Image (cartoon, coloured by chain):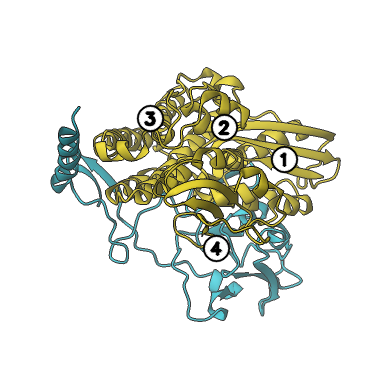
Chain colours: A yellow, B cyan
Amino acid sequence: MRMSNIAKQIAPGLALQKVDERIMTLNVGPQHPGSGHMRIIVQIDGDKIVACDPDPGYVHRGEEKMAEYRNYIQNIPHLERPVIHDSCNILYPYCLATEEILHIEVPERAKYVRVIAAELNRCVYTLYWLAIYGIFLGHSTMFMWPTGDRELLIDLLEKMTGARVTHAYFVPGGVRNDLPANFEDVCLRQVDYFEKRIRAYADIFYDNPILISRTRDAGTLSRQDAVRLGTTGSVLRASGVDYDIRKKEPYDCYDSLDFETSVLKSGDAYARSKVPWLDMLESCRIIRDALSKMPQSGSVRVKLKPNPKGDEMTSYKRVESGRGTLGCYVVSDGKPEPYRVKMSVGSFRNLISLPYLLKGEKLGNMPAVYWSLNYWPVEADR
Amino acid sequence: MGTASGIIRALNSGAKHLAVKRFTLRYPEEKLKFVGDGYQFDPTSGLGIAGYKGRHMLFHDKCTGCQLCSIACEGIAEAISMVKVAEDWKHNKKAIMPQIDYGKCVFCGLCVDACPFYALYMTNDYELSSFSKEGLIYTPSQLSVKPAISQDVEITISERGATHG
């Protein structure tokens, strides 16, 4: 069975297929713990994957359509639902685009507060992802440690925003409340300890010969293929392409902060699992730098009129989320509600590469390759 | 690095944790302390005051029955409905006040942002479970009660690792 035959089917897995003597079709998901809320249709010859067809769409929530019936502020709580661990980053492009439509200039202090919240959120998401990656590979210690260390950052976000997840913190025009008193000291202390903790992951996970033997050279994505398939974020950077929106199109105050992007060359599952970890170390650096450069006083929010109306215009903004480039396209027709909100998410763009990566792999390598794509099913379906 | 030495290093890294303090929060016995008395909002400056977004608190002597909280909640959770109260306030001619269904509330706090009269705040109370769906609906008189809270555990970091309390 060749890839082109599968692509022609309207409903994958439902249409009649010519049965080959050697090939077996296996549905992984949509209720399988190793797939999340999606189905991966794999065709195997013995233990070898001949073809693979990812089938997302089981958790489609209609977020984009819902956004057309709510005003710019009411859109905030439901737009962060696709990735509740990374809710600040998924709201970030929406807020940036809405600010352009409403012609709002964000106060200087709010830009730094936003960057700190976004970087804390990126680490919280990445740790959750890493915990699941650990348990996928049968490494239960790697499930326990990130889940515990995540608590340090969730505690900080809770002090900052008032909620452990789904913060509803970013609004067009800044953030909803200023930092609590004494936050800088607590944040520095906990982020320093957090960095010490995640450096300890190297011994038990990233330098562990058992992990390396399972993920090294599994699902290799070459530099050319990574660009051709349109992958983003950690998948693209693991294939040796230095592309990070925080550096290439700096938003808010990223251009004044001192950090580097993490790039690895090999493009296999090992590199894809290591790049988010290197990103977390950089995030700690960004948070410390932002705390030192942040203006000590000043407003953090522009006061808006109730039901603000935008001009008739469109705006497209991109940010670097935990899963790659996250773009938001907002069309306004002069009413209090946006005419259209379209989100371009990193998860979906990374998933496209899965059939190419799994071809020729062993079936046992599937979880290691699949979850290394930094894929979040709910975000991809929106 | 050889395979054997790598495995020994990994095992050693785990074994070191025998000397590290326990990080787990023993929840019903211990409760995490939050900053402040809960999320509040100052309509004159248009800024919130940092705090935990838990169960609401309604001040009957300030609520005018303007329904702005209910309008803000439309399209978000539709948890707030305005109900009649048997109270006689000069500033609340219609005698209506918000009633909140915590089976629907998402704790975003945008109702607090909408209130121009400092009547609606959020408190640190998050233990709202009930045996029935009706038990999750809080009437204006239930919302006016200040919750009794004993939360005192904080994260402390020492040489032997981080702990709760």
The earlier-in-sequence mark between 1 and 2 is 2
Q: Chain of mark 2?
A: A
* Spatial CA span between label 2 and label 3: 20 Å
Circles 4 and 1, Cβ within 8 Å, touching? The answer is: no
Q: Are marks 4 and 3 on the same chain?
A: no
Q: Which residue is mark 2?
A: A232
In the displayed structure, A285 sits above or below B35; it is above
Corner quadrant of residue A88 = top right
Q: Which residue is mark 1?
A: A304
Residue type, label 2: Thr
Can residue B51 be seen here? The reply is yes
* Spatial CA span between label 4 and label 2: 42 Å
* Spatial CA span between label 3 and label 1: 37 Å
* Mark 1 surroundings: few (<14), some (14-19) or many (≥20) residues within 10 A: few
Residue at x-position 71% and y-position 72%: B96
Pinpoint residue A52: horizontal percent, then vertical percent: 55, 47
Q: Chain of mark 4?
A: B
Residue at disc 3, secondary structure: helix
Residue type, label 3: Leu
In the displayed structure, A109 sits above or below A44; it is above
| Nearer to me, A312 or A26 | A26
Foreground mark, 1 or 2? 2
| Nearer to me, B96 or B133 | B133
